[in-house]
Image (cartoon, rainbow, N blue to C red):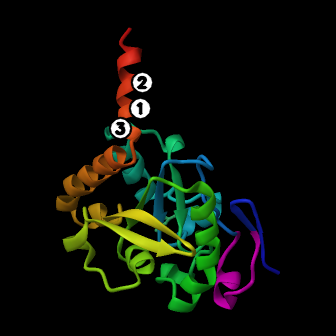
Amino acid sequence: MEHMEGLCVTGCERCPELVDSRSRIVNGVGPDDADLLFLGEAPGAKEDEGGEPFVGRSGSVLDDALREAGLARADVRITNCVRCRPPDNRDPTSDELSNCRGYLARELELVDPELVVTLGKVPSQHLLDRGVAITNESGSVVDARVGDASYRVLLSVHPAATLYDRSQREGFFETIARAADLSGLADSADGQASLGDF
Ligand code: URA
């Protein structure tokens, strides 16, 4: 059974191992017309449990970086390349990525963000369809074709990289601030801050 209602996949059994390892399908969250969309790899244990992307330790780092850029989690859309938790948190296989790609293409088409931020190597390689040395390429802006449309993409390291290697934190926070700028959200965040001053 494969089924998508709007932005949500409500049933899918294309990936036998993921059907076994998941508790649920984890769909994207956030406004259905968001200007800024974050793309992760696949749900982990916490996401599988909570049914929402980036709610574990990586999610706290992302939330902190958003806050420092003047944004709230509710301002942005957050989704993953693969919507079901892989066993033992392994990377999704190329078959799993391609099985889920149509759902991602549909979500991108409906949300039509100004900017997509790829969080880590797997989503960056998936959208660009080439090898990516993410630590070197983080901060680059490129165009990527998904389905019938092309999107502006900002490459970023995964927030978990900042947990393994503290020295990556500053660069990650700068990339998220850049994302706020490039998507036009930084302007509205500034506007709100100054209105709040009165
Ligand atoms: N890492 C990801 O790539 N996605 C999540 O949803 C959580 C952690």
Is ligand 1 less than 8 Å from the beta carbon at label 3? no
* Coordinates of residue 153 in the picture (x, y in percent): 38, 64
The residue where tag 1 is placed is 188
Q: Quadrant of the N terminus?
A: bottom right
What residue do we see at 39% from left, 52% from top? 62
> Tag 1's secondary structure?
helix
What residue do we see at 51% from left, 89% from top? 93
- Depth check, front residue: 10 or 148: 148
Q: CA distance from mark 3 to mark 2?
A: 10 Å
Mark 3, other Cα within 10 Å: few <14 / some 14–19 / many ≥20: some
Magenta span covers which residues?
10-24
Q: Are the residues flagged by discs 3 and 1 in contact, CB closer than 8 Å?
A: yes
Q: CA distance from mark 2 to mark 1?
A: 6 Å
* Coordinates of residue 46 in the picture (x, y in percent): 56, 62
Mark drawn on residue 192: 2
Asked if residue 14 is among those painted magenta in the image, a careful observer would answer yes
- Depth check, front residue: 159 or 76: 76
Q: Residue furthest right?
A: 1
- 123 is higher (above) or lower (below) than 19: above
> Tag 2's secondary structure?
helix
* Coordinates of residue 89 in the picture (x, y in percent): 50, 78
Mark 2, other Cα within 10 Å: few <14 / some 14–19 / many ≥20: few
Question: In the displayed structure, does residue 3 sit left or right of residue 17?
Answer: right
The residue where tag 3 is placed is 186
What residue do we see at 27% from left, 50% from top? 173
